[in-house]
Amino acid sequence: MRFVRFFTLKVLRRTIGFEVLCLYRGDVESGPHAAADGNIGVRTASNDDLREIESLRSERPSGWVKDRISLGESCFVARTRGGDLCGYLWAAPGPRIFRHRGKEIRIAQGDVYVRDGQTLPAYRGRGIMPQLIASARATLLGQEKRWMWAAIYDFNDSPKRSVEKAGFQLHEKICYVSVPFAGRALFCSRKQKPAV
């Protein structure tokens, strides 16, 4: 069933540009804290960390890390005791707007958008991303931040599991369809009922 869903979405995405973006929301104050792995430490990124992260993402334009830092974003890194990079996560404080295929998603003044997190392949399945989110959450406590937000494609199950383990709940599903020759994407949005 999972293969059929994945294959169907892959075919639809290529032929008519169909996508579903899931917008997750987590409470800064009352979210769970991930169990720490004694062999992995999480901290705010240093300049050396940022240089290494920039070298991992070669598809991005030169200077993208410096641009994010200048916009007030923070980066959190996970490293082994031996110093190997395990993963990272960016946290962008509001207010800000990010656009995805014509839809504006607003992040309010008291909110933070977590984005572009990555766990390196050798460390996947060890709960690194929930630890990074917990570290970002701990840093944000006392900064008058209320909500953390994450936008994840519906077909991308691993990041969805990570934010759910970190206490995020699905807030909204946004469906996009690119109609050939229309020149823009059409979208519909459906808010989710909060879990009790």
Image (cartoon, grey):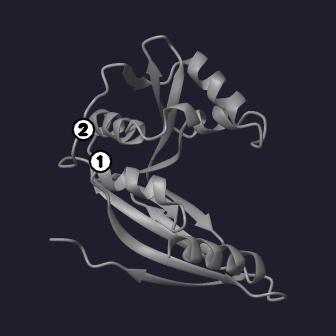
Return the residue found at the far top: 82
Label 2 neighbour load within 10 Å: few <14, some 14-19, many 20+: few
Disc 1: which residue: 145
Element class at badge 1: loop
Give the left or right position of residue 9, taking residue 87 as reference.
Answer: right
Disc 2: which residue: 141
Rendered residue at 28%/29% (across/down) = 36
Give the left or right position of residue 80, taking residue 9 as reference.
Answer: left
Rendered residue at 67%/73% (across/down) = 10
Callout 2 amino acid: Leu
Rendered residue at 73%/33% (across/down) = 63
Q: Do the residues labelled 2 and 1 touch (CB within 8 Å)?
A: yes
**Location of residue 25 in the rendering, given as x and y in whole percent from the top left corner:** 34, 60
Please determine whether, in this image, residue 83 is positioned above or below residue 140: above
Q: Quadrant of the C terminus?
A: bottom left
Give the left or right position of residue 188, taking residue 161 as reference.
Answer: right
Please determine whether, in this image, residue 108 is positioned above or below residue 9: above
Count of residue discs? 2
Question: Residue 109: in sight, yes or no?
Answer: no
Element class at badge 2: loop
Rendered residue at 58%/77% (across/down) = 4
**Location of residue 135 in the rendering, given as x and y in whole percent from the top left corner:** 33, 33
Please determine whether, in this image, residue 9 is positioned above or below residue 181: above
Closer-to-camera residue (166/171): 166
**Location of residue 184 in the rendering, given as x and y in whole percent from the top left corner:** 74, 81
Callout 1 amino acid: Lys
Give the left or right position of residue 33, taking residue 101 as reference.
Answer: left
Return the residue found at the far left: 196
Residue 43: quarter of image: top left
- The image's mark for residue 20 is none
